[in-house]
């Protein structure tokens, strides 16, 4: 089977809770998750025995789990504690190594000081030294790309250092402002552009933690808005998603409309997320994992981050005509074949997009169902595509 787009979520449930059992994995699979956090475990054999049952259940569904465990993250990974933490991690690794459902171990969340970033490098390094085949999971704060915490050279230099010193293959960051208002959408594009460019220059795959759980200023999300977060991220080169968060909690009453409520019920958000993830996976999940982003633009509204698409942006695509906000990217496959990716970047409005291209030099074919269906498009007056909010379409550019 071709590599699928990774979908997961933050699972803030402890193995000590009676209502949290390996049976929950069935719901994770139903929703379309395939690489997901496994729940919160202590550094003890009792929890490890339960963790193994979760891994076994995930294997039944062809899923991978990221183990989240006390005592193995960056938080205490100082220079003085390095060897002790490495020995502790080796003990955990020996307990679970070789399990087909094991993706990696959580290395920590939102390091936001220079000291925490140094600890992060040490933690990821020790995990890769002990378990080189696995993927340490580290998540950064989306509000930090312009911060001075990264040191000289900023976030780009730091990401290159992380790659060089640890050999890790991917990093993640969170961003939720798009669930507030239009200004939050502008902040979203600024943050995602900064992290994407830093990761790409360092040779790292970038994942994102978007939001599906309402709280504080973050409103409940429609199906369009959930899909919008998937497609805009993927169109900008993001290679995986870990949603915040899967479960509501009875001691955090401000959180609501998560996919699973505090009573264990599947909410409307669960089924909206299910359709969004499965539809994206069915259409583009395998295809986009084999593509490399070359460049991205916006059309219709300037978000003070990405450039605007114009007649000289691409030698063959002459114009993207639309009244609404649109995201445009060019991808390339391993054979050098280019793909034109278009996303309706509106959260509420339909978008009528027309593409004008140089028909003397190329032909465009719409690609559906991960390439199983190809549909040549008509050059006359430009190809039209009516896209509902967040909908993506993909065209292969066949040069003559």
Image: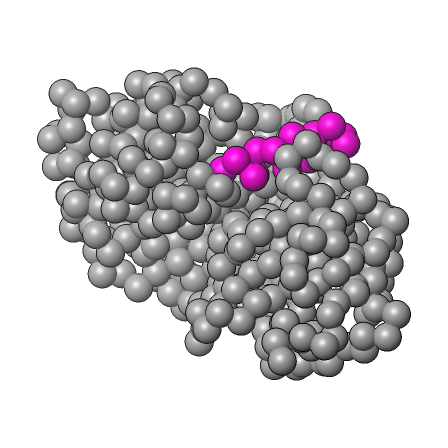
311 drawn magenta = no
Q: Is residue 133 visible?
A: yes
Quadrant of the image occupied by residue 114 = top left
Please name the predominant secondary structure of the magenta segment in the image: helix
Q: Looking at the image, which residue is at 67% across and 69% down? A: 395
Of residues 172 and 333, the one drawn nearer to the viewer in this rendering: 333
**Residue 132 placement (x, y as % from top left):** 21, 52
Of residues 77 and 372, the one drawn nearer to the viewer in this rendering: 372
Of residues 170 and 105, the one drawn nearer to the viewer in this rendering: 170
Image position of 194 with respect to 169: above or below: above
Of residues 206 and 210, the one drawn nearer to the viewer in this rendering: 206
180 drawn magenta = yes
Image position of 238 with respect to 359: above or below: above
Check the image and tell me how it is coloured: one colour
Quadrant of the image occupied by residue 61 = bottom left
Image position of 164 with respect to 381: above or below: above
**Residue 1 placement (x, y as % from top left):** 44, 76
Q: Is residue 228 visible?
A: no
Does residue 317 appear to the left or right of 90 in the view shown? Answer: right
**Residue 305 placement (x, y as % from top left):** 64, 35
Does residue 114 appear to the left or right of 259 in the view shown? Answer: left
The stretch in magenta equals 178-195
Which quarter of the rendering shows the C terminus?
bottom right
Q: Looking at the image, which residue is at 68% across and 32% down? A: 304
Image position of 312 with respect to 278: above or below: above
Q: How many marks?
A: 0
Q: Looking at the image, which residue is at 71% across and 62% down? A: 317
Does residue 342 appear to the left or right of 348 in the view shown? Answer: left
Q: Looking at the image, which residue is at 22% across and 38% down? A: 165
**Residue 108 placement (x, y as % from top left):** 36, 33
Does residue 7 appear to the left or right of 364 in the view shown? Answer: left
């Amino acid at each position: 089977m071709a590599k699928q787009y990774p979908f997961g979520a933050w699972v803030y449930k402890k193995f000590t809770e009676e209502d949290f059992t390996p049976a929950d994995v069935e719901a994770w699979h139903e929703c379309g998750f395939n690489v997901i956090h496994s729940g919160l475990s202590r550094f003890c054999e009792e929890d490890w025995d339960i963790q193994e049952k979760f891994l076994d259940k995930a294997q039944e569904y062809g899923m991978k789990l990221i183990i989240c465990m006390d005592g193995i993250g960056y938080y205490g990974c100082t220079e003085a504690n390095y060897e002790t933490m490495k020995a502790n991690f080796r003990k955990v690794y020996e307990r679970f190594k070789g399990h087909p459902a094991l993706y990696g171990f959580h290395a920590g969340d939102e390091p936001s000081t220079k000291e925490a970033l140094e600890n992060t490098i040490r933690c990821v390094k020790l995990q890769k030294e002990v378990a080189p085949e696995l993927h340490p999971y580290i998540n950064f704060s989306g509000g930090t790309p312009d911060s001075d915490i990264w040191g000289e050279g900023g976030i780009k230099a730091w990401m290159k250092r992380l790659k060089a010193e640890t050999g890790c293959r991917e990093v993640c960051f969170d961003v939720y402002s798009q669930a507030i208002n239009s200004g939050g959408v502008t902040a979203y594009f600024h943050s995602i552009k900064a992290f994407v460019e830093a990761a790409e220059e360092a040779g790292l795959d970038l994942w994102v933690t978007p939001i599906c759980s309402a709280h504080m200023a973050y409103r409940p999300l429609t199906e369009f808005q959930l899909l919008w977060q998937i497609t805009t991220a993927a169109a900008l080169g993001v290679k995986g998603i870990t949603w915040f968060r899967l479960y509501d909690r009875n001691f955090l009453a401000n959180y609501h409309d998560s996919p699973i409520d505090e009573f264990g019920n599947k909410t409307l958000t669960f089924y909206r997320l299910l359709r969004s993830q499965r539809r994206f996976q069915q259409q583009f999940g395998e295809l986009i994992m084999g593509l490399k982003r070359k460049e991205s633009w916006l059309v219709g509204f300037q978000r003070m981050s990405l450039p605007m698409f114009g007649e000289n942006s691409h030698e063959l695509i002459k114009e993207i005509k639309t009244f609404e906000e649109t995201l445009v990217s060019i991808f390339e496959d391993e054979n050098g074949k280019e793909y034109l990716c278009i996303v309706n970047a509106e959260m509420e409005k339909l978008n009528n997009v027309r593409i004008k291209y140089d028909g003397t030099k190329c032909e465009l074919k719409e690609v559906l169902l991960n390439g199983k269906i190809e549909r040549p498009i008509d050059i006359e007056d430009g190809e039209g595509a009516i896209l509902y909010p967040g909908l993506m379409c993909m065209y292969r550019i066949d040069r003559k």
